[in-house]
Image (cartoon, helix red, strand yellow):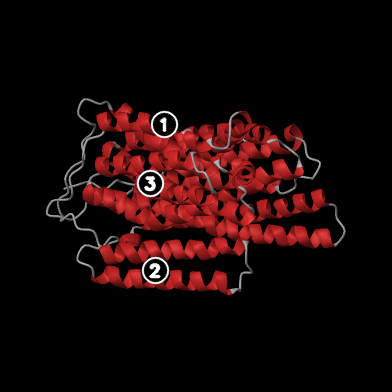
């Protein structure tokens, strides 16, 4: 597909830096951002003990990051297009690293939660910029496929590795090191990015002016919607603390759509989702994010609350899943150039759904080798196979000047799916466990059954995404070109 208008061509590589160095920088940055979503989960209990935080405050250690991250992703992706990818990469990285340092030294709950929110802002700038740099650097379809494959493997495995790292750091050092570990990574990345990346130029004739009204309405709408959704963990679904922010969020997003039809330089050009690949990829990412974030959450709790694993033991239990993700990404990377997205999307969805169905039958007296090893490997393989074609489809056929927007949209969709899924599936799991406890089942059996219900619902959602995958192209997509 050829775009209209003239866009400044992206360099094949940074001056003086091989393309492999650019790939290493963007992959490590994405790893750091996604790692931070998972790494705090196994440190929450110790955070609560250290800073006298109850359950209501502890959930905001996670939610403050999630809400700000999801709300600002679209804006973060667009700023990379308008103000320069290298500049915004370094800006997001600096914000993220400094906030991590402040959070590690936090003397109280308020400081920690505020630092996590600022981390989310830095991540929302950094995450879509990494993908933007990747798709504008690797213009050859085969090279781009391999690069996206590695980037996807790193992003997907970061969630599982985050659980391992969180357990190890919390057990051996302190909960503060789940935040401090970002500081040396951030310094290393800043030096690497300053050398390897070159600044991008905006499309010819474009003004570096942000669609402020659109940016404010979409960011506020997404943040308010996610706020309402995560409120389900504390309040009934039909209560005002849940319904009011959801309604306000939907209204703001409707206002955003109207604003974009009238804006001179819209943050999301009308017709963006008319690209079939982009629309389908975001639908799959929405339901996939719902299932996968919930799976990580339920499995972590199952290991600790039902089987009695220590944090470091629970973290080690995620290793087979991580290995499966890396292996699945390798398979998908080889398949994608010759088959197009449909085959790997369907195959990966079937494998992941099978693993989740298997996991949904895990008993309260499970052992890792007999009951957990095989299904977690299957889930990892499925995630790895699906991640590459989703990312490739979401950014194919898109003009280079909109690469940051496409990256922000797919990242935002995943986060929204995760927030929606975690709130909804946790509610279903808790309700099922409570019903069994009231019927006289032991606490361990009731908890296990509740988490199993969550795994089952996640499998159903993966099945829905697999059906949608059948509508994707069965042949390799032709990338957009500038000119």
Measured in 3D between alpha carbons, the distance from the residue under mark 2 to the one under mark 1, in whole angstroms, is 36 Å
Sequence-first disc among 3 and 2 = 3
Question: Residue at (57%, 63%) from the top-left corner?
Answer: 231
Q: CA distance from mark 3 to mark 2?
A: 23 Å
Q: CA distance from mark 1 to mark 3?
A: 14 Å
Q: With 42 as the anchor, is 206 left or right in this view?
A: left
Element type where label 2 sits in the image? helix
Which label number is shown at residue 253?
2
Badge 1, how many Cα within 10 Å: few under 14, some, many 20+? some
Looking at this view, is 123 or 350 the one in front?
Answer: 123
Q: What percent of the width, then of the height, locates residue 65?
A: 48, 51
Q: Position of residue 144 (x, y in %)?
A: 33, 37
Seen from the viewer's position, the closer of residues 329 and 64 is: 64
Q: For residue 335, say whether it is visible.
A: no
In the picture, residue 4 is in which quadrant?
A: bottom left
Residue marked by disc 3: 122
Mark with earlier residue (1, 3): 3
* Helix, strand or loop for disc 1: helix
Residue where numbered disc 1 is placed: 185
Q: Relative to residue 250, is residue 396 drawn left or right?
A: left
- Residue at screen point 25% across, 42% down: 87
């Amino acid at each position: 597909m050829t775009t209209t208008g003239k866009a400044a061509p992206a360099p094949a590589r940074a001056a003086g830096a091989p393309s492999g160095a650019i790939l290493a920088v963007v992959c490590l940055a994405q790893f750091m951002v996604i790692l931070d979503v998972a790494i705090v989960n196994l440190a929450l209990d110790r955070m609560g003990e250290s800073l006298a935080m109850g359950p209501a405050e502890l959930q905001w250690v996670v939610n403050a990051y999630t809400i700000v991250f999801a709300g600002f992703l679209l804006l973060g992706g667009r700023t990379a297009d308008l103000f320069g990818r290298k500049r915004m990469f370094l800006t997001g990285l600096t914000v993220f690293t400094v906030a991590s340092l402040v959070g590690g030294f936090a003397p109280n709950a308020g400081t920690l939660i505020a630092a996590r929110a600022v981390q989310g802002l830095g991540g929302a700038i950094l995450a879509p910029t990494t993908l933007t740099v990747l798709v504008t650097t690797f213009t050859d379809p085969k090279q781009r496929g391999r690069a996206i494959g590695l980037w996807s493997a790193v992003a997907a495995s970061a969630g599982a590795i985050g659980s391992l790292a969180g357990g190890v750091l919390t057990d051996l050092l302190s909960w503060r090191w789940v935040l401090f570990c970002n500081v040396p990574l951030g310094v290393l990345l800043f030096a690497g990015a300053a050398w390897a990346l070159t600044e991008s130029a905006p499309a010819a004739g474009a003004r570096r002016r942000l669609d402020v009204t659109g940016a404010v309405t979409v960011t506020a709408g997404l943040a308010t919607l996610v706020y309402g959704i995560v409120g389900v963990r504390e309040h009934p679904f039909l209560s005002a603390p849940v319904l009011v922010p959801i309604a306000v969020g939907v209204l703001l997003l409707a206002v955003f759509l109207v604003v974009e039809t009238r804006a001179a330089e819209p943050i999301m050009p009308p017709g963006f989702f008319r690209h079939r690949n982009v629309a389908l990829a975001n639908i799959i990412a929405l339901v996939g994010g719902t299932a996968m974030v919930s799976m990580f959450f339920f499995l972590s709790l199952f290991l600790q609350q039902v089987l009695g694993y220590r944090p470091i033991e629970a973290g080690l239990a995620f290793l087979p899943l991580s290995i499966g993700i890396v292996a699945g990404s390798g398979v998908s990377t080889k398949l994608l150039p010759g088959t197009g997205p449909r085959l790997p999307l369907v195959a990966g969805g079937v494998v992941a759904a099978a693993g989740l169905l298997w996991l949904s039958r895990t008993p309260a007296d499970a052992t890792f080798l007999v009951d957990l090893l095989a299904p977690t490997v299957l889930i990892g393989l499925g995630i790895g196979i699906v991640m590459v074609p989703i990312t490739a489809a979401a950014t194919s056929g898109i003009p280079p000047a909109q690469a940051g927007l496409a990256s922000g949209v797919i990242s935002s969709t995943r986060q929204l799916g995760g927030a929606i899924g975690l709130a909804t599936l946790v509610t279903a799991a808790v309700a099922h466990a409570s019903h069994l406890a009231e019927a006289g089942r032991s606490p361990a059996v009731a908890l296990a059954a509740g988490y199993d219900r969550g795994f089952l619902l996640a499998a159903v959602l993966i099945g829905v995404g697999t059906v949608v995958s059948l509508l994707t192209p069965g042949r390799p997509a032709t990338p957009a070109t500038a000119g």
